[in-house]
Image: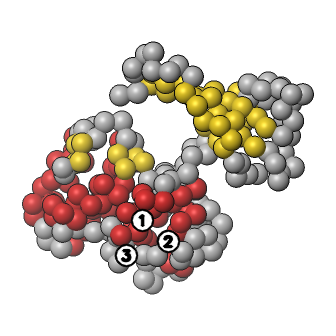
C-alpha cells in the first residue's frame, strides 16, 4: 500500500559543477507509519500532481468542475448506456485524488492521440471546419510534434493543451470525455541508500536528473 512520507531533506549533491545534470539526496521520515526496510531494499515513489495544475485542469473543462467532487461510474456513462464503467480508482474518489495521485496530467505522444480524437469528435459536432482540418492533419501525421500553439517535446501538460484549444478554436471537453483517456500515474523505483541500523525511522534515496 502507498504511504505519504514527510521529506526531511532534499539537497543538491553535485552543486552546479555540471550545468545539465543534477543529483538530489532525499531523506524521508518513516515516523507515524509501521513501515520498515532492510539495507539494499527498493522504494516505489509515485509523483503527485501539483495543486496549481489540478486547478488549471478543473477550470479548463466544460463544464468546470470542483476538485472536491466525488466520482462515480454513473457520471462517466453516456446517456442511455447502461453498461458499467470500470473506473481506474476506487468509487467515490475525489477529482483532486483522481488526477493528483491515480492519473497523470503529463502526456506523452501516445497519450495525446486519444485526446485529439475526442477534440476532433467535438469539432465535427460543432461543424468547426478549421479545427477539423487541424485535427485531421495531426491525427494523420501521428508523430507531429506540435498541437495548436503548444510546443511538444517529450511531454505536454494536459491543462496547457485544453487551454490552447479553447483559446484557438473555442473547443472544450468535459471531465467525462477525458476521464477514461488519461494515462495512469507511474511509480518510480529507487534503491534505498541508508542503513536501517543507523536510520531506523528514516530512509534515503539519491535521484539523478538530466536537465534540458
- Picture coordinates of residue 203 (x, y %)? 76, 35
Crowding around mark 3 (Cα neighbors within 10 Å: few <14, some 14 to 19, many 20+) is: some
Where, quadrant-wise, is the C terminus in this rendering? Answer: top left
Query: Between marks 2 and 1, how big is the CA–CA gap?
Result: 7 Å
Query: Between marks 3 and 1, how big is the CA–CA gap?
Result: 10 Å
- Label 1: which secondary element: helix
Q: Is residue 148 visible?
A: yes
Residues tagged 2 and 1 counted as in contact (Cβ below 8 A)? yes
Residue at x-position 42% and y-position 83%: 79
177 or 191, which lies in front? 191
Query: Between marks 2 and 3, how big is the CA–CA gap?
Result: 10 Å
Crowding around mark 2 (Cα neighbors within 10 Å: few <14, some 14 to 19, many 20+) is: some
Q: Which residue is mark 1?
A: 55
Residues tagged 3 and 1 counted as in contact (Cβ below 8 A)? no
Residue 140 location, quadrant: top left
Q: Residue furthest bottom?
A: 80
Residue 122 location, quadrant: bottom left
Q: Residue furthest top?
A: 17
Of circles 3 and 1, the one toward us is: 1
Q: Which mark is residue 64?
A: 3
Q: Which residue is mark 2?
A: 67
Q: Is residue 8 above or below residue 60?
A: above
- Picture coordinates of residue 63 (x, y %)? 35, 78
Q: Which sits earlier in the primary sequence, circle 2 or circle 1?
A: 1
Residue at x-position 18% and y-position 68%: 170
Amino acid at each position: 500500500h502507498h504511504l505519504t512520507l514527510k521529506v526531511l531533506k532534499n539537497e543538491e549533491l553535485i552543486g552546479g559543477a555540471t550545468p545539465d545534470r543534477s543529483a538530489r539526496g532525499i531523506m524521508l521520515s518513516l515516523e507515524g507509519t509501521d513501515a520498515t526496510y532492510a539495507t539494499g531494499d527498493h522504494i516505489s515513489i509515485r509523483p503527485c500532481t501539483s495543486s496549481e495544475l489540478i486547478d488549471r485542469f478543473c477550470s479548463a473543462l466544460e463544464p468546470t468542475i470542483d476538485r472536491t467532487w466525488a466520482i462515480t461510474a454513473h457520471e462517466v456513462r453516456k446517456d442511455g448506456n447502461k453498461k458499467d464503467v470500470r473506473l481506474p480508482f476506487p468509487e467515490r474518489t475525489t477529482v483532486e485524488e483522481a488526477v493528483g495521485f491515480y492519473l497523470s496530467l503529463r502526456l506523452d505522444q501516445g497519450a495525446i492521440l486519444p485526446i485529439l480524437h475526442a477534440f476532433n469528435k467535438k469539432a465535427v459536432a460543432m461543424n468547426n471546419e478549421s479545427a477539423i482540418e487541424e485535427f485531421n492533419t495531426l491525427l494523420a501525421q501521428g508523430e507531429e510534434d506540435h498541437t495548436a500553439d503548444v510546443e511538444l517535446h517529450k511531454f505536454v501538460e494536459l491543462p496547457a493543451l485544453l487551454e490552447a484549444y479553447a483559446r484557438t478554436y473555442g473547443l472544450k471537453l468535459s471531465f467525462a470525455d477525458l476521464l477514461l483517456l488519461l494515462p495512469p500515474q507511474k511509480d518510480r523505483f529507487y534503491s534505498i541508500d541508508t542503513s536501517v541500523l543507523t536510520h531506523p525511522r528514516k530512509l534515503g534515496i539519491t535521484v539523478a536528473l538530466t536537465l534540458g
